Image (tube, helix red, strand yellow):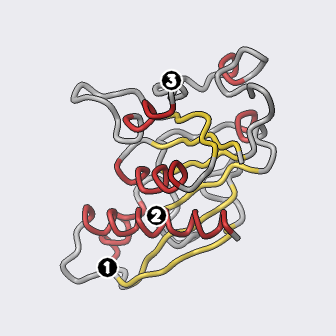
Amino acid sequence: MRIVFFGTPEFALPSLEVLLTGGHDVTLVVSQPARPVGATPAGGPAGGLEGQGAGPLRLAARVVEGPGGALAPRGGRRDLFVVVAYGRILGPKTLALPRLAAVNVHGSILPRWRGASPVQAVLLAGDERTGVSLMRMEAGMDTGAVYATAETEVGGEEDAGSLSTRLAAMGAGLLIRSAAG
């Protein structure tokens, strides 16, 4: 399966790693521009793709459309876009590019905490349970069909960093189990 991966922070790394080591053809890794402190976490492993990494990539219409666009398929259409904490909304033209779908690994049980800060929202609300969702991406924010979820208890002493680390690993597991099934 030919996959384009979109992800930026540490939360994205476990999912990228399971795809890279799981026999999938990750043809492109797209991350947000590096900040003054250095490369983005998900942009770093892209170097192992023999020059196929593309972070930063500006997803303007002129970039994604046409035969010379960065997301235009080389030797065939891309099968799947996998998005994990990318940090930008993909527009309808971009979401229409993969042959199968664009899927998102989201750090909460949808629809409870949609949006960009689900881990922090869980902790601020005092939720006792949370988890991750694998969903089909649509033009709306976290509005697509949910394919699978995995739940866990929130530890009493857990902070955003430790919970995010656990959820990132759970999301990677959910992604690879779904890809295998």
Question: Is label 3 or label 1 in front?
Answer: 3
Q: Nearer the viewer, residue 24 or 123?
A: 24
Q: Amino acid at mark 2?
A: Gly
Q: Distance from label 2 to label 3 (Cα)? A: 29 Å
Task: Name the residue located 78 percent from the left edge and 18 percent from the top edge.
Answer: 66
Q: Secondary structure at mark 3?
A: loop
Q: Which label was assigned to residue 107? A: 2
Q: Nearer the viewer, residue 16 or 82?
A: 16
- 144 w.r.t. 61: above or below: below
Q: Is 181 on the left or on the right of 27, as rendered?
A: right
Give the mark nearer the N terminus: 2 vs 3: 3
Q: Secondary structure at mark 2?
A: loop
According to the image, label 1 marks what residue? Answer: 126
Q: Distance from label 2 to label 1 (Cα)? A: 16 Å
- Tags 2 and 3 in contact by the CB under 8 Å rule? no
Q: In the picture, which quadrant includes the C terminus?
A: bottom right
Percent across and percent down for residue 44 are: 37, 35
Q: Which label was assigned to residue 51? A: 3
Q: Secondary structure at mark 1?
A: loop
Q: Amino acid at mark 1?
A: Gly
- 45 w.r.t. 116: above or below: above
Q: Amino acid at mark 3?
A: Gly
